[in-house]
Image (spheres, rainbow, N blue to C red):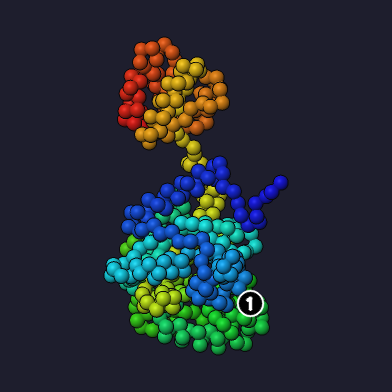
Amino acid sequence: MITKPKGTTDITGNDALLWEYVNSVVSNIMTAYNYEYIRTPIFEMSELYHRSVGENSDIVRKETYDFKDKGNRNLTLRPEGTAGVVRSYLENKLYASPDIKKYYYNGTMYRYERPQTGRLREFTQFGVEVIGSNDPIIDAEVISLQYHLLEALHINNLQVNINTLGDEESRANYKEALLKYLKPHINELCEDCKERFKTNPLRILDCKIDANSEILKNAPKTINYLTKDAKDRFEKVLRYLDLLEVDYEVNPRIVRGLDYYDHTVFEIVSLDKEETSQSVLGGGGRYNKLIKELGNKDTYGIGFACGIDRIVNMMKEIELYKNVQKEIDCYVMYVSEEEKLHAIEIVQNLRLNGVVTETDSLNKGLKGQFKEADRLNAKFLIILNNEDLKKGLVNVKDNHTKEEEKVDIDEIVEYIIGNL
């Protein structure tokens, strides 16, 4: 028997309903915030990720799915969403109009990691990218959107861990202090951190292996090396978050794992879970230098990403999934062949008018059809019998109130729609 590849999963049954529910909330919230849907390819030229994510990042060195196509081109399955959106922005000259661009995406990503709960090799993320504004209010809006979207999914015990990497001068000051601090301790850290010390020391702070070491806990903090302008900007972001009723905590250890971040960086965690990587539901930050690096277009940007796999797991753990169940509007019931002909017509008319409708196709008796209608949580039952049909009537039962009514067969669609 052929089985699914390691690190992937099938989504069926109640899990599929939960995924559909999360996707619908995402779509509704993004529409309310005036974010435009964007879809980019699942695979891109490898150079895109090497330049944006970083040649020396763990993602590029260890985790990307790279391959050559039949034209001998180097391609990579996307490991994250930002780079593709920025590439699309530049390639399609979306900067031609001066307005701010607000995009959201929802799709699969791929990283070759050790599979575990909430961390698969094929996983799904939704996220946003806002391009064209450096106003701190946009930082606060992006964080607030993520925070309140998760609240809309009834995940309420949330906290945003936020930090700032500052501007270019701030980063240079901090990098110098960090190198000076880490140099005497570097041999006590993991092999990856020894390499990061030479290439990008800020990544050491994001190390999964040494995360709880006293060395990293006592490392210098970015917030102590900010220029006045960077500090003032960060204080505005926090002030706006207060107005937007976002629960946050300034956490100097938040640096995020990708090279392109500057200024505001953040993660959103559930306080209902023990503090581990699995408690992190999403995160992001500002990337004001990335767009220029990829296309010589000096433009501001900020975004976030959330893992749907991890969100669904969280909702199941706190039993929110009990509120998400299969429901249909109408179940049409029949027994005889003549009744079946009318059922086919009624079902078709209801479906074409947007009414979620089902009927029997397994030759069940009336008792079996009642059970099936209950399993599907049908709001209305349309029970056909030849005597009523001769009079041009059908029997409609409200499956919640148990009230029944005879309805003209030619008015059944209007009746059902009017009572939904």
Instruction: Rate crowding at label 1 as few (under 14), some (14 to 19) or many (20 or more) other CA atoms within 10 Å.
Output: some
Find residue 41 and report its horizontal and vertical position in percent: 48, 61
In the foreground, 286 or 189: 286
In the foreground, 135 or 35: 35
Q: In the rendered view, tell whether residue 157 sits above or below residue 289.
A: above
Rendered residue at 41%/66% (across/down): 88
> In the rendered image, which residue does mark 1 sit on?
192
Rendered residue at 66%/78% (across/down): 191
Is residue 40 in view? yes
Decide if residue 233 is on the left or right side of residue 309. Answer: left
Residue projecting furthest to the front: 71
Q: Secondary structure at mark 1?
A: helix
In the rendered image, which quarter contains the C terminus? Answer: top left
The amino acid type found where label 1 is placed reads Asp
Find residue 379 and report its horizontal and vertical position in percent: 42, 30
Find residue 110 and report its horizontal and vertical position in percent: 56, 62
Q: Quadrant of residue 296?
A: bottom left
Find residue 386 and report its horizontal and vertical position in percent: 43, 13
Rendered residue at 41%/72% (across/down): 286
Decide if residue 389 is on the left or right side of residue 185. Answer: left
